[in-house]
Image (cartoon, helix red, strand yellow):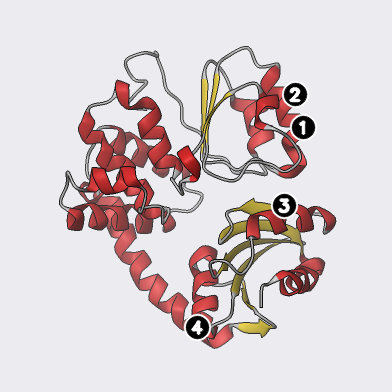
Amino acid sequence: MAAFRGSYDEVKVFFTHPVGLLNDFREFAEGDVVIVDIAINEAHANELISTFRNYPGNITFVDHHPPPLSASLEAFNVEFVRPPNGEDASSSELVFRRFSKHLPRDYDRVALYGCIGDYADQTSWVKEALGRWDKRQIYFEAGVLVQGLEGSRRMHDFKRHVVEHLSKNLRPSMLSELLVRALIEAVNNEELYKWVKANVRVEGEVAYVVDPPGSIGIAATYAMGLTGKKVGIAAETRGETLVMSLRAVKGVIDLDRMLRKVTLLLGGSGGGHPEAAGARIPKARFHQLIQQINDRVAT
């Protein structure tokens, strides 16, 4: 938003996800489009190719997730911005580096918040950028931002307000509602930890919880950490579908590649990163997925 404000009459912000990208693009896209941090859903790859190739505006796709298995990125005919040299760079870093010529240098701290929030704070760019700031302040602001947003799920108007705030290079902690939500979320996370500890279940090397009272990403991490198992899953019931977040110990399984393949066979979709991913499958197939994971975990 900050980079484009001087070049366009209006900059609109929409929130989507891998499963919803295709339909949301068809409904809302107009003018030049920048897509950020959305993994390409394996089931929609070919339809996205057709949709993008027929779109009259420019499309820039900034993403750090592994590419789809079923299609080459060249087939999409858009500008892809990807991590350099295989680095584990966040999309936040990639956005700043791609559009930095349109921004004052001190906007790098906004990018740093995203890098820290995405556990991607060990790249050479992040280390260099952090050296220009007081690290303690940057990590504090990143914590406020991440916690506050986690406590604002599905509140898209509020999140657009946060985007507007950050586009002015204002600190997250200066937005009082965000700060209050972060404090509330900190209390909620402590209660979530206690709940996971009391309700976690184990099958083989998979620890899981269903319908935790809070973030499924954090609950998946708690499930894995509390049990010492190699994979943690937290699932949220939505009708006959389970929406899941998965975490894995580094090196034991590539969750992204496994989920891209297995979830299609189970009537769902999934993907993300080797150690952190998401998935949606029919509720009745949940334990089949757990078995598939156990079959693939490195022993």
- Quick one: label 3, few (<14), some, or many (20+) residues within 10 Å? many
Q: Within the image, what quadrant is residue 296 found in?
A: bottom right
Secondary structure under tag 3 reads helix
Could you tell whether 154 is left or right of 121 in the image?
right
Q: Is residue 294 visible?
A: yes
Secondary structure under tag 2 reads helix
Residues marked 1 and 2 touching at CB (< 8 Å): yes
From what the image shows, is residue 197 above or below residue 161?
A: below
Instruction: Indicate the quadrant containing the N terminus: top left, top right, bottom left or bottom right.
Output: top left
Which of the labelled discs sits on residue 226, or is there none?
A: 4
| Residue 112 screen position, x and y as percent | 31, 46
Which of the labelled discs sits on residue 46, or is there none?
A: 1
Residues marked 3 and 4 touching at CB (< 8 Å): no
Q: Earlier in the sequence, mark 3 or mark 4?
A: 4
From what the image shows, is residue 134 above or below residue 100?
A: below
| Residue 64 screen position, x and y as percent | 52, 43
Amino acid type, label 2: Ser
Give the Cα distance between marks 1 and 2. Answer: 6 Å
Give the Cα distance between marks 1 and 3. Answer: 15 Å
User: For this rendering, which residue is in front, 1 or 246?
Assistant: 246
Q: Within the image, what quadrant is residue 129 found in?
A: top left
Q: Is residue 213 visible?
A: no
From what the image shows, is residue 198 above or below residue 66?
A: below
Amino acid type, label 3: Arg
Q: Earlier in the sequence, mark 3 or mark 2?
A: 2
Instruction: Look at mark 3 in the image and give the residue it sits on.
Output: 260
User: For this rendering, which residue is in front, 147 or 228?
Assistant: 228
Q: Earlier in the sequence, mark 1 or mark 3?
A: 1
